[in-house]
């Protein structure tokens, strides 16, 4: 019987040299395929630059591509080499609606200050060092969506991925003039000063869910077989802190695969979160779409092989058919130690990446799907 699992890894520009040359890309793809992986999530949008030549960025900000890769198309190279060894490619829009990191908004807000997200004191929204674009603003939404659709239209990708910054906004945001006026028109009063007021929180989260519905519809209108992948933070912390209502995303069928970032450094912490998600958020049917994000390397931290094995073992025990690792270089440290554990253990038998039908049940599960056609939203029921 053939095995079907999601075996993925994130490819970064930080702390990694994979993108530095085509030869490096070739070597990395060969290595991942030999280790038993079947999908890669390469970063294509971070630090206000793209890893592909972008007309959208050139027209809006005069910067076509990350200057480090000028004269190349890293994404095109990676797609070619990944598909050569049967790896799926789902580009990862890492920065999402973040503008910069400890740079007062950086290039994006220097050029378009009206796009800034604001806290209740009117300051540029900063959370954990990241400064933010106003996710609730229609122009900002159009810009980020145009980057995503540029990739979908121009490259032979297998899907696209958002994360804990797409769609997201720190709960402290939403106090810009336009959003305040919108709230006033709807409720006849100012937004609460308490950013975690439940009604104010949910109202803003619903705007983000509406954006995801639009994104999902527009991607599917271009190619219905493309996967919309999301790697949010953990429910329901993500809702309270970043307005990410992943529970509703799943209910509305707005995500094909989902990778909650369960970045815990000991097994018991990881297990308790999996138990909570399986019990409170995922049904037997939506669990098909769950492949948790697992931290294997960050700074000086490297997961140990025993914990790595426990994670995969527990995922399978819970009916979770896959995981995605952050990030690639963790597999290569200590003479490829973790990769050897995978190749000689749970990834020894090759696994096919699941089809859309697999992910959505393939047995008459009914989902509410939003598709945008000819500028109009058509809501319809779709049988998978």
Image: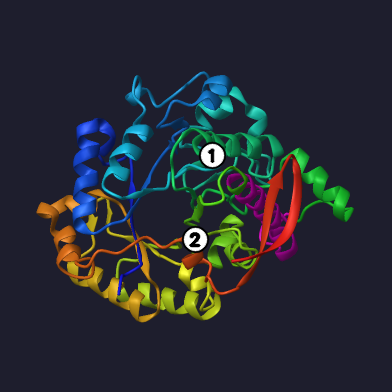
Please determine whether, in this image, residue 333 is positioned above or below residue 356. above
Please determine whether, in this image, residue 174 is positioned above or below residue 293. above
On the image, numbered disc 2 is attached to which residue? Answer: 356
Which of 272 and 121 lies nearest the eye of the viewer? 272
Q: Position of residue 363 (x, y in %)?
A: 55, 74
Name the disc covering residue 29, or none: none
Q: Is residue 208 left or right of residue 12?
A: right
Queried whether the magenta region covers residue 77, the answer comes back as no
Which of 109 and 10 lies nearest the eye of the viewer? 10
Q: How is the image coloured?
A: rainbow
On the image, numbered disc 1 is attached to which residue? Answer: 148
Q: Is residue 384 visible?
A: yes
Image label count: 2
Q: Residue furthest right?
A: 188
Q: Between marks 1 and 2, how big is the CA–CA gap?
A: 20 Å
Q: Residue furthest front?
A: 1
Q: Position of residue 165 (x, y in %)?
A: 52, 48
Q: Is residue 123 left or right of residue 270?
A: right
Image quadrant in which you'd find residue 2: bottom left
Q: Position of residue 98 (x, y in %)?
A: 53, 41
Name the residue rendered at 59%, 42% in the picture: 222
Label 1, secondary structure: give it: helix
The rendered magenta stretch, by its main secondary structure, is classed as helix
Which of 225 and 129 lies nearest the eye of the viewer? 225
Q: Residue furthest left?
A: 335
Instruction: Categorize mark 2 by other alpha carbons within 10 Å: few (<14), some (14-19), many (20+).
Output: some
Image quadrant in which you'd find residue 368: bottom right
Name the residue rendered at 48%, 42% in the picture: 95
Q: Is residue 120 left or right of residue 16?
A: right
Task: Report the magenta residues as a range.
Answer: 193-219
Label 2, secondary structure: give it: helix
């Amino acid at each position: 019987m053939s095995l079907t699992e999601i075996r993925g890894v994130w490819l970064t520009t930080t702390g990694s040299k994979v993108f530095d040359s085509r030869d490096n890309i070739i070597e990395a793809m060969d290595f991942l395929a030999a280790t038993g992986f079947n999908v890669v999530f390469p970063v294509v949008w971070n630090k206000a630059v793209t890893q592909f030549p972008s007309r959208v960025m050139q027209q809006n900000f005069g910067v076509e591509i990350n200057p480090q890769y000028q004269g190349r198309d890293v994404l095109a190279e990676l797609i070619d080499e990944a598909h050569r060894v049967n790896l799926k490619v789902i580009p990862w829009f890492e920065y999402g609606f973040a503008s910069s990191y400890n740079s007062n908004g950086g290039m994006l807000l220097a050029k378009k200050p009206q796009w800034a997200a604001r806290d209740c004191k009117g300051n540029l929204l900063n959370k954990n060092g990241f400064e933010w674009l106003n996710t609730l603003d229609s122009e900002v939404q159009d810009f980020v969506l145009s980057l995503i659709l540029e990739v979908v239209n121009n490259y032979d990708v297998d899907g696209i991925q958002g994360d804990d910054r797409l769609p997201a906004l720190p709960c402290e945001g939403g106090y810009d003039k336009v959003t305040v006026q919108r709230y006033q028109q709807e409720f006849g009063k100012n937004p609460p000063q308490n950013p975690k007021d439940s009604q104010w929180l949910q109202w803003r989260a619903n705007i983000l869910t509406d954006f995801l519905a639009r994104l999902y519809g527009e991607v599917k209108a271009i190619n219905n077989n493309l996967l919309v992948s999301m790697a949010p933070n953990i429910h329901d912390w993500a809702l309270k802190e970043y307005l990410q209502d992943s529970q509703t995303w799943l209910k509305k069928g707005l995500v094909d695969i989902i990778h909650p970032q369960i970045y815990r450094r000991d097994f018991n912490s990881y297990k308790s979160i999996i138990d909570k998600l399986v019990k409170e958020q995922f049904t037997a049917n939506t669990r098909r779409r769950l492949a948790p994000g697992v931290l294997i390397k960050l700074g000086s931290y490297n997961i140990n092989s025993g914990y790595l094995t426990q994670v995969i073992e527990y995922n399978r025990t819970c009916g979770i058919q896959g995981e995605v690792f952050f990030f690639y270089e963790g597999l290569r440290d200590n003479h490829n130690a973790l990769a050897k554990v995978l190749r000689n253990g749970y990834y020894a038998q090759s696994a096919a990446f699941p089809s859309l039908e697999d992910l959505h049940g393939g047995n008459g599960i009914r989902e509410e799907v939003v598709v945008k056609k000819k500028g109009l939203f058509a809501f319809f029921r779709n049988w998978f």
